[in-house]
Image (cartoon, rainbow, N blue to C red):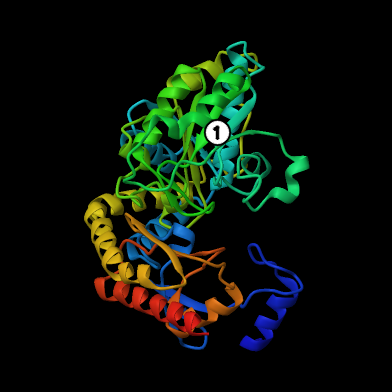
Amino acid sequence: MYTETEQLEFDANHIWHPYSSATNPSPTFMVERCDGVMIELTDGRQLIDGMSSWWCTVHGYNHPRLNQAMTDQITKMSHVMFGGFTHNPAVELSRRLVELTPSGLERVFLADSGSVSVEVAIKMAIQYQASRGKPQKHRIMTVRNGYHGDTFGAMATCDPVTGMHHLFQQSMPQQLFADAPPLGFDRPFQSSDLDSVRHLLEHHAEETAAFIIEPITQGAGGMRFYSPDYLAALAELCKAFDVLLIADEIATGFGRTGKLFAVEHAGICPDILCLGKALTGGTMTLAATLCTAEVANGISHGEAGVFMHGPTFMGNPLACRVACESIDLLLENNWSQQVSQIERTLNSALSPLRQHASVANVRVLGAMGVIEMKQPVDLNEIQPRLVEQGVWLRPFGKLIYMMPPFVITQAELEQLCRATTAVIEQLQQQ
């Protein structure tokens, strides 16, 4: 049995973590177990998770109903190929998704992860256009400050300048980028906000298959909240220019913004919808791409006659079963009330930070709180300080943000905010 020190040393020398350096890795903390909203380190320290493990553990960790769902399913089958077979977990999950998502989304493609669901959406859009006899409509349009994943098709739709993937720019398809939506959920919408989008559509609609956007909240591209009226007007523009609309709800789906799906803020139904992260309550990797009957039928009547994608673990029954339980749990737990309470507390607890000299902006929407600093934060410095305060956040760039599990208690959320404020004050005094 290796000691904790030996394990951490091996980790530092041989294991690559997300967005990390092999020669100068960020501090890494050894986790023993997780329960509820608490992460327990092997040295006994308890951390309140303010990240929902990158936005997916909406019910907290080690939930007995999710555990039981997986236990029950694994005794039957953990996996079986989806080509030529189907099974109850996949049917029931797809039934729930069709019922819950905006009316009009009728076909469900079950994939492995959020990035893959975006790849699937892009391929759907391009194949649909080709099936209509318009193969020239093969490019994707989007806005700056967006983030859609780390695989190549998804990377090509992330911001090419401020995003994380500019090093690969020469190897990726060259897509079309409009100006980012103006910041502010409550900001009055002006027609001029879409001038950049309108200009691109006027000049490139004939070669554009689809427009992809994160509805209401741009996540890893800057945690930016924008007007629902902007999204509604964008949907109308796409329709007018014969361009499909892809809504990337991987981060926003299942209640995070205060609506079950963020597109509901704008009252629209996209042509294609991407889901992931919270889909299984943070227990297993799974994603889904939904589309309208028009898109599905168009693809199926085209040259190939089939949609050209099929992951090995597509429709994994273990993941589908726990996703069904997670959705049921979400609906039974009155998620809307949970998110509203989190929003009220975040607004109250983070508001004083607006007066801090080092803070540029504080914004809250649903179960998301964002503290934008005037200068970039040093992850290697701030992360250990947060751990010392008993909380877990993962800041990036100028942003210290929190997206806690919906089951977090009032006391835990207040402690999360107090600890974060204390660390900001420590850094300001340096």
Residue 153 placement (x, y as % from top left): 65, 39
Q: Residue at x 50, y 48 (%)?
A: 286
Q: Is residue 424 above or below residue 114?
A: below
Q: Is residue 339 above or below residue 203?
A: below
Question: What residue is disc 1 on?
Answer: 121
> Can the viewer see residue 82 in this picture?
no
Residue closest to the eye, 59 or 233: 233
Residue closest to the eye, 211 or 181: 181
* Pointer 1 local density, CA inside 10 Å: few below 14, some 14–19, many at least 20: many
Residue 312 placement (x, y as % from top left): 62, 42
Residue type (three-letter) at the residue carrying disc 1: Ala
Q: Is residue 126 above or below residue 402?
A: above
Residue closest to the eye, 328 or 84: 328
- Figure disc tally: 1
Residue 229 placement (x, y as % from top left): 34, 35
Quadrant for residue 146, please give it. top right
Q: Is residue 146 above or below residue 299?
A: below
Q: Which of the image's four quarters has the N terminus?
A: bottom right
Horizontal arrangement in the rendering, residue 25 relative to residue 97 (left or right): right
Residue 42 placement (x, y as % from top left): 52, 84
Q: Residue at x 64, y 27 (%)?
A: 139
Q: Residue furthest top?
A: 133
Quadrant for residue 10, please give it. bottom right
> Can the viewer see residue 70 in this picture?
yes
- What is the secondary structure assignment of the residue under circle 1? helix
